[in-house]
Amino acid sequence: TTLADETLRREAEYRRGLHDAALVLAPQSIVGVPRYRVYEAMSAGRLPVWVGDDLMLPLPRRVDWSRVAVFVDSREVDDTGEILRKWLRDTLPADHLAREAEAQRAYREVLHPNLFPQMMTLEVKERLDL
Protein backbone atom coordinates (compact mmCIF):
# COMPACT_ATOMS: atom_id res chain seq x y z
CA THR A 1 0.00 0.00 0.00
CA THR A 2 1.03 3.57 -0.58
CA LEU A 3 1.36 6.26 2.06
CA ALA A 4 -1.82 7.87 0.71
CA ASP A 5 -3.71 4.56 1.02
CA GLU A 6 -2.46 4.11 4.57
CA THR A 7 -3.47 7.67 5.46
CA LEU A 8 -6.97 7.11 4.07
CA ARG A 9 -7.28 3.80 5.95
CA ARG A 10 -6.25 5.42 9.24
CA GLU A 11 -8.62 8.35 8.70
CA ALA A 12 -11.52 5.96 8.04
CA GLU A 13 -10.60 3.94 11.13
CA TYR A 14 -10.50 7.11 13.23
CA ARG A 15 -13.91 8.22 11.92
CA ARG A 16 -15.42 4.81 12.72
CA GLY A 17 -14.02 5.03 16.24
CA LEU A 18 -15.40 8.54 16.63
CA HIS A 19 -18.87 7.43 15.56
CA ASP A 20 -18.73 4.37 17.82
CA ALA A 21 -17.69 6.37 20.89
CA ALA A 22 -20.14 7.32 23.62
CA LEU A 23 -17.90 10.22 24.69
CA VAL A 24 -14.79 11.76 23.09
CA LEU A 25 -11.87 12.92 25.21
CA ALA A 26 -10.67 16.42 24.38
CA PRO A 27 -7.97 17.36 26.86
CA GLN A 28 -7.04 21.00 27.11
CA SER A 29 -3.95 22.03 25.17
CA ILE A 30 -3.38 25.68 26.07
CA VAL A 31 -5.07 26.93 29.22
CA GLY A 32 -8.67 27.71 28.40
CA VAL A 33 -8.48 27.03 24.66
CA PRO A 34 -10.68 24.24 23.26
CA ARG A 35 -8.94 21.69 21.07
CA TYR A 36 -10.05 20.78 17.60
CA ARG A 37 -11.22 17.44 19.01
CA VAL A 38 -14.13 19.27 20.70
CA TYR A 39 -15.47 20.40 17.34
CA GLU A 40 -14.72 17.07 15.69
CA ALA A 41 -16.76 15.24 18.34
CA MET A 42 -19.67 17.66 18.06
CA SER A 43 -19.70 17.51 14.25
CA ALA A 44 -20.07 13.74 14.56
CA GLY A 45 -22.89 14.10 17.08
CA ARG A 46 -20.77 13.02 20.03
CA LEU A 47 -20.19 14.72 23.37
CA PRO A 48 -16.70 16.02 23.95
CA VAL A 49 -15.15 15.51 27.35
CA TRP A 50 -13.16 18.60 28.28
CA VAL A 51 -10.42 17.84 30.73
CA GLY A 52 -8.99 21.00 32.22
CA ASP A 53 -9.65 24.22 34.08
CA ASP A 54 -10.32 27.83 33.20
CA LEU A 55 -12.07 26.91 29.99
CA MET A 56 -13.02 29.75 27.70
CA LEU A 57 -16.20 28.33 26.24
CA PRO A 58 -16.79 29.72 22.77
CA LEU A 59 -20.08 31.53 22.16
CA PRO A 60 -21.68 30.68 25.52
CA ARG A 61 -24.78 32.74 24.69
CA ARG A 62 -25.44 30.48 21.71
CA VAL A 63 -24.22 27.09 22.93
CA ASP A 64 -25.48 25.47 26.13
CA TRP A 65 -22.17 23.84 27.00
CA SER A 66 -23.66 22.15 30.07
CA ARG A 67 -25.80 20.11 27.65
CA VAL A 68 -23.33 19.41 24.83
CA ALA A 69 -20.14 18.54 26.72
CA VAL A 70 -18.91 16.74 29.82
CA PHE A 71 -16.32 18.48 32.00
CA VAL A 72 -13.58 16.97 34.14
CA ASP A 73 -11.56 19.25 36.40
CA SER A 74 -7.79 18.86 36.01
CA ARG A 75 -7.53 18.02 39.74
CA GLU A 76 -9.67 14.95 39.02
CA VAL A 77 -7.83 13.83 35.89
CA ASP A 78 -6.66 10.61 37.58
CA ASP A 79 -10.32 9.71 38.19
CA THR A 80 -11.50 10.52 34.64
CA GLY A 81 -12.45 6.92 33.85
CA GLU A 82 -14.62 6.56 36.94
CA ILE A 83 -16.15 10.03 36.46
CA LEU A 84 -17.17 9.15 32.90
CA ARG A 85 -18.47 5.69 33.84
CA LYS A 86 -20.62 7.34 36.52
CA TRP A 87 -21.83 9.98 34.04
CA LEU A 88 -22.84 7.25 31.58
CA ARG A 89 -24.57 5.22 34.34
CA ASP A 90 -26.47 8.26 35.64
CA THR A 91 -27.53 9.64 32.25
CA LEU A 92 -30.62 8.14 30.69
CA PRO A 93 -30.03 6.84 27.15
CA ALA A 94 -32.73 9.15 25.75
CA ASP A 95 -31.06 12.16 27.40
CA HIS A 96 -27.66 11.10 26.08
CA LEU A 97 -29.10 10.87 22.54
CA ALA A 98 -30.79 14.27 22.91
CA ARG A 99 -27.51 15.80 24.08
CA GLU A 100 -25.67 14.29 21.11
CA ALA A 101 -28.25 15.80 18.76
CA GLU A 102 -27.86 19.18 20.51
CA ALA A 103 -24.08 18.96 20.15
CA GLN A 104 -24.32 18.26 16.44
CA ARG A 105 -26.88 21.03 15.95
CA ALA A 106 -24.66 23.50 17.86
CA TYR A 107 -21.76 22.60 15.60
CA ARG A 108 -23.80 22.91 12.39
CA GLU A 109 -25.59 26.14 13.36
CA VAL A 110 -23.01 28.00 15.45
CA LEU A 111 -19.53 26.47 15.63
CA HIS A 112 -18.95 25.31 12.05
CA PRO A 113 -15.87 27.08 10.62
CA ASN A 114 -17.98 28.73 7.90
CA LEU A 115 -20.26 30.30 10.54
CA PHE A 116 -17.89 30.95 13.41
CA PRO A 117 -16.65 34.43 12.34
CA GLN A 118 -20.22 35.65 11.84
CA MET A 119 -21.27 34.21 15.21
CA MET A 120 -18.26 35.78 16.96
CA THR A 121 -19.16 39.17 15.47
CA LEU A 122 -22.71 38.86 16.81
CA GLU A 123 -21.41 37.79 20.20
CA VAL A 124 -19.07 40.79 20.45
CA LYS A 125 -21.81 43.20 19.34
CA GLU A 126 -24.19 41.80 21.96
CA ARG A 127 -21.60 42.01 24.72
CA LEU A 128 -20.80 45.60 23.79
CA ASP A 129 -24.49 46.43 23.35
CA LEU A 130 -23.91 47.68 19.80
Image: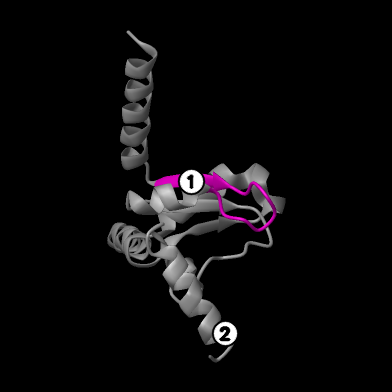
Q: Quarter holding the N terminus?
A: top left
Would you call the spot at circle 2 few (<14 residues within 10 Å), some (14-19), or many (20 or more)?
few
Q: Is 26 covered by the magenta stretch?
A: yes
Q: Which residues are magenta?
A: 23-35
Q: Position of residue 90 (x, y in %)?
A: 43, 58
Viewer can see residue 61? no
Location of mark 1 (residue): 37
Which residue is painted at 45% across and 45% down in the image? 24
**Horizontal relation, residue 41 to residue 126: left or right:** left
Question: Mark 1: which amino acid?
Answer: Arg
Of 71 and 33, the residue lying toward us = 33
Task: Indicate which disc residue 127 carries.
Answer: 2
Give how far apart the Cα atoms at labels 2 and 1 are. Answer: 27 Å
- The residue that appears at 44% across and 52% down in the rendered structure is 39
Q: Is residue 118 above or below residue 92?
A: below
Does residue 114 show up? yes
The overriding secondary structure of the stretch rendered in magenta is: loop
Q: Residue at x 48, y 67 (%)?
A: 65
- Who's the residue at 38% across and 64% down the image? 115
Q: Mark 2 is on which residue type?
A: Arg
Q: Quadrant of residue 57?
A: bottom right
